[in-house]
Image (cartoon, rainbow, N blue to C red):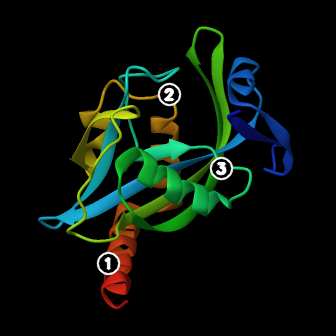
Amino acid sequence: MNQVLLVDEQDKALRYEEKVIAHELCLLHRAFSIFIFRIESQKLELLVQQRAYTKYHSGGLWSNTCCGHPLEDKSIEESANDRLYEEMGIRAHLKYLGWFCYQVPVAAHMYEHENDHVFVGILSSYKCKIRSNLEEVIDFKWIEWSQVLETLTAVTPWFKPAVQHLLTTINQTDLLNLIQTMQIQKSNL
């Protein structure tokens, strides 16, 4: 059974619930969003994905690199890394940037009400090939970060709140510096 962790407003764990029921009843639960960046021609770019049409909600819409719910037996960071590999076929170095709460309708009688934990990262290698899982993702592309909200129009309901969280948590210069620092640290490993 696919379950999500129900939480309170302070993100304290309460209990597990079946995922579809949590979405139908608009129950607050823990989730994560991953934003993978690269620097191309001195411009910061974000890897975005188009969700498969067969997803139980928000199919065909564009979104951040990856999102999901933590697994019962793993930390949120381990779950995020596993889901990133499952959806996009890539490994990444992730940095945690806090969480935010949002609530939006996503389909008839279906809602997202999440404490969304946000991670940013870079690919573990420039030679890394993106191999998206077609059951999860039908397309992907790199978009210049400064243009992301203007470029994408048909997006998932959580995409804009997650981008806003990033914009209020870290400015573009600091984000660029963070990504550059992550690249340097990775190359020193």
Q: Which residue is mark 2?
A: 157
Q: Secondary structure at mark 3?
A: loop
Q: Is residue 156 left or right of residue 142?
A: right
State the residue at coordinates (65%, 10%).
109
Q: Quadrant of residue 41?
A: bottom left
Q: Give the label on residue 129, or none.
A: none
Q: Is residue 47 left or right of residue 23?
A: left
State the residue at coordinates (47%, 24%).
55
Q: Is residue 76 visible?
A: yes
Q: Check disc 2 and give the amino acid type.
A: Pro
Q: Check disc 1 and give the amino acid type.
A: Gln
Q: Secondary structure at mark 2?
A: loop
In x, y percent, where is residue 77? 59, 62
Q: Where 162 sits versus 138, above or below?
A: below
Q: Nearer the viewer, residue 134 or 47?
A: 134
Q: Decide: marks 2, 1 in contact (CB < 8 A)?
A: no
In x, y percent, where is residue 165? 53, 49
Instruction: Mark 3: give few (<14), some (14-19) or many (20+) Cα within 10 Å.
Output: many
Q: Which residue is mark 1?
A: 183
Q: Is residue 162 left or right of residue 72?
A: left
State the residue at coordinates (77%, 28%).
27
Q: Decide: marks 3, 1 in contact (CB < 8 A)?
A: no
Q: CA distance from mark 2 to mark 1?
A: 31 Å
In x, y percent, where is residue 157? 50, 28
Instruction: Mark 1: give few (<14), some (14-19) or many (20+) Cα within 10 Å.
Output: some
Q: Which residue is mark 3?
A: 70
Which tag is nearer the camera, tag 2 or tag 1? 1
Q: Where 127 sits versus 50, above or below?
A: below
